[in-house]
Amino acid sequence: ADTQQELSKEQHFQTDPNEPEPPGLKDFLQRVEDVVIRQLLRNAKSHAFDGFQVNWDDRSHLVSCLHYLQHHAAQERGLHVTSVSWSCTGSVIACAYGRINDGSWSTERSCVCTWNLDRQRLNPKQADLVIDVPTAVTALSCHPNQPALIAGGLYSGEVVVWDTSRTQDPVLALTGMSADSHREPVYQVAWVPLQKKGQFGVLSACSGGRVLLWMVDSDQGRFVLNAAYALVRQQVPHSSSIRVQGSSTVGVTSLALSPWDLDTFLVGSEAGLLLRCSFSSNTLAAGASEGQSVPLRAPAVFSFRPSSGPVHSIHCSPFHRNLFVSAGTDGLAHVHSLLQANPLLSLRVSDSYVFQVQWSPTRPLVFAAATGQGEVLIFDLGHRSLRPVATIEQGGVGQAATCLAFNCRNPNRLAVGNTNGTVGVWHLSTNLTEQSYRESIQLEEIANQVAE
C-alpha cells in the first residue's frame, strides 16, 4: 500500500510534455518580466545587506567542550594552570603549573604537561609527557617552527628550553643563576626571530624590570645573553597622566611582540604602566649594576595612558599593524593604537581581574579574555553592543580562568587554563572562526579613530 501511495505521489508531481500550459501563465510571465528584471538589477547594486550573514548556528552552540585535561598529581597539591601554549603543528597543548596567588611557594616543585589531541587513544586524565620542574613555572611558549621545543620561565628567575623529543633529559638549555640572569620571577617568555633567517632567540621579562634576549646554544646546553634591557622609572617617557617618582625599576608583568615590526615590543608593568619599546635602543639604562656580559639599555620610547593596576596581558593584532589589546586588574580590556596614548575602546570584561587577552588568529574583530571569575568572554567588535558574543564557563565557584590560547593551525580550538588545575579545550563554531564580509574594513575604521 505504501509503495502504491509513493507511486501515485510521483505521478502527481510529474508533468506531461503534451499537456497544455495552465491558462494565462505565459501572458503573466511576459507582463512581469520587465518588472522582475528591473528589481533584480536594483538588488544587485544595493548595499542594504552588506555584512549580513545568515547565522545557521544556534547561539548556545557557539562553543562546546571537547576535552577536560587533568594531571592529578598537580591537582592534589592544589597547583594552578599558569600558562598554556599550542605547538606549531596545532596538535599538542603544553600546560604549565604553579600558583597565581602570592605566598611563600618559591621552593614548591611543579611540572609541565603535554597532550597530543590528535592521538587516537587520548587520555584526558593522563598527560603524554610530564616534565618535573624544581620550582613553579610562570610562563610558557612553544617554538614557532620546531614542535618539540618549549621555552619556559620559572619563579626562581631562570629561563629554560625543553626538548620534548628527549624523554630522559628534556632540558635543552637553562640560564642558571649568574650576573646575567633574572633574579625575580619570569612572567613572560617569547620566541623572537633573529637576524639570521630561521633562527630564534628567547625573550624573557621579569618583575625586576629586566627584559633579556637569549640565544640558545643547544650543543653546550646553555643560553648566551644577546641583548639586555632595563626599565627604569626615571627613563620612562611620560605624559601629564604619568607621575614619575624616584628611580626604581619598572616591574614587568606582561610583554608582547609586534608581528609587523621586528624592532617593536610592548611592556606592561605592576604599576599599570604600558610602554612601547625598541630593540634597537642605544640609550644606556640608568644606574645599571656591574657584572653583565652585555650593557643594559633603556628600551622605552613611548608611554600609553596607564591603568589603575597591574597589566596582566598584552597582545598585538595579527590583522592590523597599529592595534593591540591590553588587560589587567581593572577588569577592562583596552583596545589601543600604537600611535595614540589613550585607548580607542575600553570594554568592561569583569568585576574581577582579567588574566589574559588574545586576538583571534582568523577573525580580525574578535578577541577573548580570561577572567578571575572563571569565565572566558569572547568579544566581537563588529557588534554594536560590545557585549560578549560567547561565554565559556569552566571550573566551580571561586575558580579563576588564568590563561587561554587560540590555536593558529586549528582555529576551531581554544585552550583555557584554570586555578582548579584543569585545562579545557573548547570547540569554536564557524561564527567565531570564519572572517565575515567587510570585517577588515571595520577594523581599519576602528584603528583610524581618534581616542578621546
Image (spheres, rainbow, N blue to C red):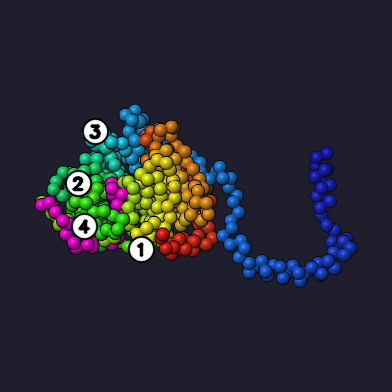
Q: Which residue is mark 3?
A: 104
Q: Which residue is mark 2?
A: 182
Determine crowd level at label 2: few under 14, some 14-19, many 20+ residues with C-alpha closer than 10 A: many
Q: Is residue 293 left or right of residue 51?
A: left
Q: How many marks?
A: 4
Of mark 2 and mark 3, the one earlier in the sequence is 3
**Magenta part of the chain:** 263-290
Discs 2/3, front: 3
Amino acid marked by disc 1: Leu
Q: Is residue 184 visible?
A: yes
Determine crowd level at label 4: few under 14, some 14-19, many 20+ residues with C-alpha closer than 10 A: many
User: Which is the main secondary structure of the residues drawn in magenta?
Assistant: loop
Q: Is residue 121 above or below residue 44?
A: above
Residue 339, label in figure = 1
| Residue at 53 percent of width and 58 percent of height | 436
Q: Is residue 441 above or below residue 403?
A: below
Amino acid marked by disc 4: Gln
Of mark 4 and mark 2, the one earlier in the sequence is 2
